[in-house]
Amino acid sequence: MSQSEIARQRLTTEVLAIIEAGVDTPLSDAEFNRYSLELFALQYETNKIFREFCDAKMVRPGDVGRWQDIPMVYNDVFKTHLVASFPLEQSVMACLTGGTTSLTQRGRIFRDEDGQKLVFNANKMMTGAYLFPDFTENHRCRILILAPSPQLAPSMGMAIGMDQTRRHFGTDDSLFLLGKSGIDVTSLLKALRESEASGAPVALIGATAAYVYFFQSCRRKKMTFHLPPGSRICDGGGYRGRFGVVTRNDYYAMVKEILDIPESHCVNVLGEVETATNLFDDQLRRQAVGLLPRARTRPVPPWSRVVAMNIDDMTPLPDGEVGLLAHWDLANIPTVLSVITDNLGYTVYGGTACEMVGRAKIEQGKVSPLPDEERSMGPLGDSAIFRMLETYTNFSIDLKMRLAKDPRKEVPGIREEIEARPGSVASCPQIVDELLVAQADKEAARLRDASLDAFRNQTDRPLDWYKTAAERQQLGDHPAGLKSEKPSG
């Protein structure tokens, strides 16, 4: 075993121990700094792309003594380069990145067994701490998931993550409610009525946009639910406004009106496939552990650091000032420690928490600090995929809400799954938080199949992609050009 492999195994073991210690066990800046510098040295040695990037930046291990000075890699780089700090033949997990309009140009994030263990453990800890903070060990509830299953979309990070949540926190009757034919509205309504009747709380997890339209459909049908105390809802991906102006407070009001879930039990999650750890808002956790209420923020766990960077010169900003959010995550051992995103946000409480306000846009070659109206994350995501999500969500839920019957008013029978009726436009699969492909026309059906093929190809034939990417890099798609990946002023 080489020295780098020994160092990697040791770092993985120690970072896993930090994660297992939980979100309330602090890691001092000195300790975080030591681990970061060790990881920088390891990734510089084992990651050719990152090494050449650092050389182009003229920053190498030994040149810096602070984690803040380790080169940040823009998340766009993952779309054009293989950013892996381990032999790619050892990959056991592959995810497509979001944020690009071409399925053929999506980036791939690869993880080996250690990397998979790190991302699974990090997000199990975060989910338990912020979505299920009131659960004792081995406590479970029924989880209703408005996302495709990993079987349908095997390389979609959110599908993989939600399946892990189901495995660790869900009962056996938990459901994935998005299939190739769209949203299984009948099963969703049936599950909500069953929760009402039994008094057993449920957890709903899914895309903000899907919830917004579902709630609007419920309003039109004058349909409401009174879910038992302890029920909760977690939304991600955000809302871009296709179904009318809906603020975050409007969303909370709809959750209360339609589901009878209080704002305290509404949780929002921000996930970036380029960095290992999802960030949840802390409203539910603060109530569960007896802390005083405060404005929602996303606490940064001990194994991570988040800094808002000035859009002009990429220098750190003080609390409260909006810039591009950069993440240093010790769980990123299989890729790179530090990733700077195109998410606009700010830090609070001395950098121990952050909040996101939108995505950056480019005007006249410069990054604008104002959230782009067409790419707003407030609080939804971006890409043509999400635009198709909204069109399809409109079509699918509206059709099925018209066809579905309220289980409370019907004698329960054999489970029925409403499909698009013959002669209607074929519905398409949904990709939640990073991918949801569908649209109510023939072009949408083509995109649906292309997307599912992309997921399958990512999982079944990754080595073909490695070779293609390597050939592109040899032809001049070289990391020395990474300095132009994001305008800096």
Image: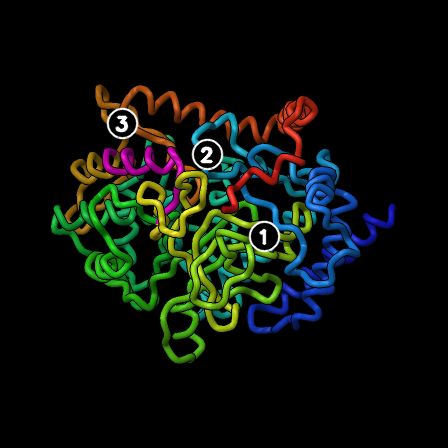
Q: How many labels does the image show?
A: 3
- Helix, strand or loop at label 3? It is loop
Q: Residues within 10 Å of mark 2 (few under 14, many from 20)?
A: some
* Closer to viewer: mark 1 or mark 2: 2
Horizontal side, residue 478 vs residue 270: left or right: right
Mark number displayed over residue 365: none
* Closer to viewer: mark 2 or mark 3: 2
- Which residue corresponds to mark 1? 120
- Which residue corresponds to mark 2? 100
Question: Given contact means CB atoms under 8 Å apart, are the residues at marks 2 and 3 in contact?
Answer: no
Q: Residue at x 47, y 45 (%)?
A: 158
Q: Which residue is drawn at 66% across and 45% down?
A: 335
Horizontal side, residue 5 vs residue 405: left or right: right
Quadrant of residue 149 in the image?
top left
Q: Residue at x 30, y 44 (%)?
A: 187
Magenta part of the protein: which range? 380-395
Question: Given contact means CB atoms under 8 Å apart, are the residues at marks 1 and 2 in contact?
Answer: no
Q: How far apart are marks 2 and 3 (CA)?
A: 21 Å
Mark number displayed over residue 440: 3
* Closer to viewer: mark 3 or mark 1: 3
Q: How far apart are marks 3 and 1 (CA)?
A: 35 Å
Residue 216 visible to an observer of this rendering: yes
- Helix, strand or loop at label 1? It is helix
Measured as percent of width and height from the top left, residue 296 is found at: 38, 67
**Residue 119 in magenta?**
no
